[in-house]
């Protein structure tokens, strides 16, 4: 019935394949990619984190279409997204709920890696880049929390940015550096906005790439259930 | 005949794998359409709140002196009153916590039943918790018709 459509798609894929070798890449990396036996559902958590990260990028860009990063307009622009823009509530709450889910899933991912010993040699760099990624995820959640410029976000950020204050000698300097002043002020919103929408996501994308590259280079670590001879 | 039928089946590829492939593809495409609908409607500029068809016009005779009329204008409740000073119209939403005020013809005040806020006929707060006057609604009287803007 749709054979003409299949033919068209096949011809397009052949055209791309001739110029890129895409079929071989798909065959080696996806369709005939060998994984150790007895993988379980814990192995899906890394891919799930990647999926939520992608979802956050999409909903985040959509929010940028209406969000205004200024102390005068931030809160009213959020109200507009929630109350006036069609499906604005869905986009914003997906972004908010997604941030929570991302933390939960990454923590479960780390727990599974710890309990199955997957961080061991030669996968230390994968583990360390993952540790950097969860710290960046926490940082992106923290900077995003201030952006609605509500009472809740203002005071939560006031409390959280005062945490380094008791550090001897450099504590007060660090607080001032993060806030861009002695207190949370309009400049704080701008620097948090810049960190939240470009600096941290760009670094995270690079690190995710490195993380996945290492996973592919070293192969997936076998589950504790698989026999030693399966590990090759 | 039976050989022809057999080759026909093989060639068109009507088998379980193909059925599953098309079903999965269809589901994915359906999900994509739903998501695309959300994104497109989110990104489309919202239409202005007042369409021409939403214009509210009522004859002056519908509000005789001393009476009031509650009507819906641009999706929100509006209270029009006819006092000795003429016709005036306010948003019926109390500026305190958003209950609907009503006109008390005897006392000539707007009264909010929730927390006993009182406003005079010009919308100014007379008593109770409301922090600001009632919001006036603009209107014009053309040919004995009240047209809300």
Image: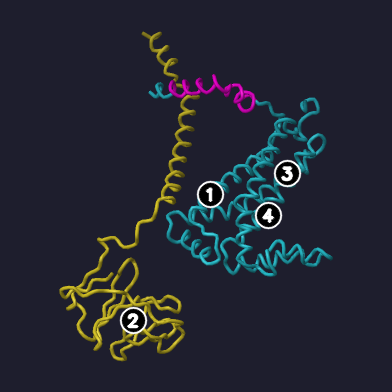
Chain colours: A cyan, B yellow
Residue at which label 4 appears: A139
Bounds of the magenta segment: A6-32
Foreground label between 1 and 2: 1
N-terminal label among 1 and 3: 1
Q: Chain of mark 4?
A: A
Q: Quadrant of the N terminus of chain B?
A: top left
Give the left or right position of residue A40, taking residue B101 as reference.
right
> Neighbour class for label 2 at 10 Å: few (<14), some, many (≥20)?
some
Vertical relation: A30 (above or below) B44: above
Task: Name the secondary structure under disc 2.
Answer: strand
Q: Is residue A34 highlighted in magenta?
A: no
Image x and y of residue A5, in percent: 41, 24
Which of the 4 quarters of the picture holds residue B29?
top left
Task: Name the secondary structure under disc 3.
Answer: helix
Foreground label between 4 and 3: 4
Foreground label between 3 and 2: 3
Q: CA distance from mark 1 to mark 2?
A: 45 Å
Foreground label between 1 and 3: 1
Q: Chain of mark 3?
A: A
Image x and y of residue B109, in percent: 33, 87
Which of the 4 quarters of the picture holds residue A85?
bottom left
């Amino acid at each position: 019935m749709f054979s003409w459509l299949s033919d068209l798609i096949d011809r397009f894929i052949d055209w791309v394949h001739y110029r890129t070798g895409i079929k071989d890449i798909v065959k080696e990396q996806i369709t005939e990619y060998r994984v150790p036996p007895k993988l379980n559902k814990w192995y899906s958590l890394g891919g799930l984190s990647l999926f939520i990260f992608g979802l956050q990028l999409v909903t985040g860009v959509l929010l940028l279409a209406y969000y205004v990063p200024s102390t005068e307009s931030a809160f009213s622009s959020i109200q507009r997204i929630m109350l006036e823009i069609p499906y604005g509530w869905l986009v914003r709450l997906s972004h908010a709920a997604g941030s929570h889910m991302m933390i939960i899933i990454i923590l479960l991912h780390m727990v599974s890696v710890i309990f199955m010993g997957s961080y061991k040699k030669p996968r230390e760099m994968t583990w360390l880049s993952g540790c950097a990624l969860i710290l960046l995820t926490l940082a992106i959640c923290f900077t995003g929390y201030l952006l609605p410029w509500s009472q809740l976000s203002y005071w939560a950020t006031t409390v959280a940015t005062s945490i380094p204050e008791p550090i001897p000698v450099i504590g007060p300097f660090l607080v001032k550096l993060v806030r861009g002043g002695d207190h949370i002020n309009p400049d704080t919103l701008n620097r948090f906005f810049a960190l939240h929408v470009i600096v941290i996501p760009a670094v995270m994308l690079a690190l995710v790439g490195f993380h996945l590259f290492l996973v592919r280079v070293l192969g997936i670590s076998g589950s504790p259930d698989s026999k030693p001879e399966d590990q090759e | 005949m039976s050989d022809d039928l057999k080759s026909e089946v093989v060639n068109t590829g009507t088998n379980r794998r193909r059925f599953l492939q098309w079903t999965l593809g269809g589901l994915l495409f359906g999900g994509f359409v739903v998501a695309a609908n959300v994104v497109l409607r989110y990104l489309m500029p919202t239409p202005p709140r007042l369409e021409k068809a939403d214009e509210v016009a009522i004859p002056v005779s519908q509000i005789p002196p001393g009476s009031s009329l509650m009507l819906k204008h641009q999706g929100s409740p509006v209270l029009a009153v006819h006092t000795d000073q003429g016709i005036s119209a306010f948003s019926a939403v109390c500026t305190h916590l958003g209950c609907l005020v009503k006109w008390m013809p005897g006392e000539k005040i707007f009264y909010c039943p929730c927390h006993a806020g009182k406003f005079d006929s010009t919308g100014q707060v007379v008593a109770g918790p409301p922090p600001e006057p009632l919001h006036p609604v603009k209107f014009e009287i053309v040919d004995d018709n009240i047209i809300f803007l």
